[in-house]
Image (tube, rainbow, N blue to C red):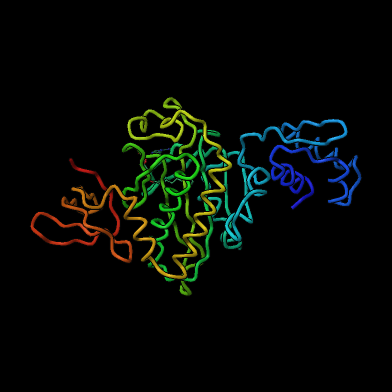
Amino acid sequence: ITVTHELAKRLMEAGGEALSGQYLADEFGISRTAVWKHIKELEEKGYTIESIKKRGYILKEIPDTLEPIAIQPLLKTAKIGQVMEYIDSCPSTQILAHKFAQEGAPDGTVVLTETQTAGRGRLARKWDSAPQKGIWMSVILRPDVVPQKAPQFTLVAAVAVVRAIEEVTGLKPEIKWPNDILLNGRKCTGILTELQSDADGIQALIIGIGMNANQELEDFSPEVRDIATSLKMMDGKTVDRQELVRSLLFYLEQYTNLYIEQGFKMLKIMWESYSSTIGRPVRARMAKETLEGIAEGITDEGVLQLRTNDGKLHGIYSADIEMKN
Ligand code: BTX
């Protein structure tokens, strides 16, 4: 953490109160001129800082960027996001995260970008990632669990996403098994969990989260306009993306810890309470077949239980789910 980082942190924490140049100089053990230089550096990054004679510096506005300097100071996690890689534009944060993981990036490393040129969903589908409008993020985790448990992290992440959206916007999203977060039946977030494993087990889990935050309808490509929505489109309010990232990382840490320590039981209850799938008639499209029936629940392993009309109960590990009316 650099002095500029620390300075940004102090100004953010001051919550609109002035901090004097002398106070800051003493805190950091540098001269007041040096403090002023760091203030200028923040201003060049787009921070609006008011300096008032005899009183000091007040932070007025932070630019709408997902740079670590704008996120980390108020981050309430012990692990996730303590290392953050930020890049203005990239093909896909998943690709980058895989590379960083192979190079030894620590547990909890977060990769963030403003836009992706080749954002991806499951089965090589495209993920629309409008510049500066969403949260396009991959989180590297190195949990000590067997590879079979990897899909459950998608469910755990889904609960974290819902909690973060609720906390920051007050909106009430639903989860569609396994990885869609919906508002009014439209997708506002997608989650993609990928795995690096070898004979010793999981080397890294790469959890990709794509959240539509501030898009207007025209910001989406025509192919997804009928199925997608953003938080802003739901309540007309521009959401603070930095706060959303912080909240998301906080809950992701809470719930992945809970999962690793206590298993899926508690999270299953939470997941089911947010689910739009359970208890409803659905159609499950899988690679080889399509089944219709009632989604009765998920198992402790996160497997969807689907009862078809002939009374048989099927365990579904991976599928696209359509709701039937
Ligand atoms: P999925 O396969 O469940 O969903 C992909 C489908 O969702 C697409 O085929 C399209 O119909 C629709 N779609 C595409 N873009 C959007 C969007 N922005 N909003 C709503 N619907 C959309 C879901 O896969 C997993 C997505 C993970 C995305 C993150 S972003 C950060 C990370 N990097 C990366 O390349 N992927 C992940």
- Residue 224, x across and y down, in percent: 36, 33
Q: Nearer the viewer, residue 90 or 244?
A: 244
Residue 147 position in % (x across, y down): 41, 68
Figure quadrant, ligand 1:
top left
For the residue pair 246 and 302, the one nearer the viewer reads as 246
Viewer can see residue 266: yes
Left or right of 110? Residue 121 is: left
Visible residue check, residue 100 = no
Question: Looking at the image, is 66 positioned above or below residue 262?
Answer: above
Residue drawn where x is 57% and y is 57% of the image = 80
Residue 257 in the image: state x and y as whole percent: 50, 64
The residue positioned 87% from the left and 46% from the top of the image is 25
Residue at image location 46% in from the left, 68% down from the top: 260
Q: Indicate left or right for 19 with 262 as reference.
A: right
Q: Is residue 96 left or right of residue 268?
A: right
Q: Does 322 appear above or below 98?
A: above
Which of the image's four quarters has the C terminus? top left
In-image side of 224 versus 298 (left or right): right
Q: Residue at x 48, y 60 (%)?
A: 205
Nearer the observer, 4 or 139: 4
Location of residue 182 by image quarter? top left
Q: Residue furthest bottom?
A: 200
| Camera-side residue of 311 and 243 | 243
Residue 119: horizontal and vertical position, in percent? 47, 42
List the single residue furthest toward the top: 218
Q: How many marks?
A: 0
Asked where in the image residue 19 lies, by quadrant, the reply is: top right
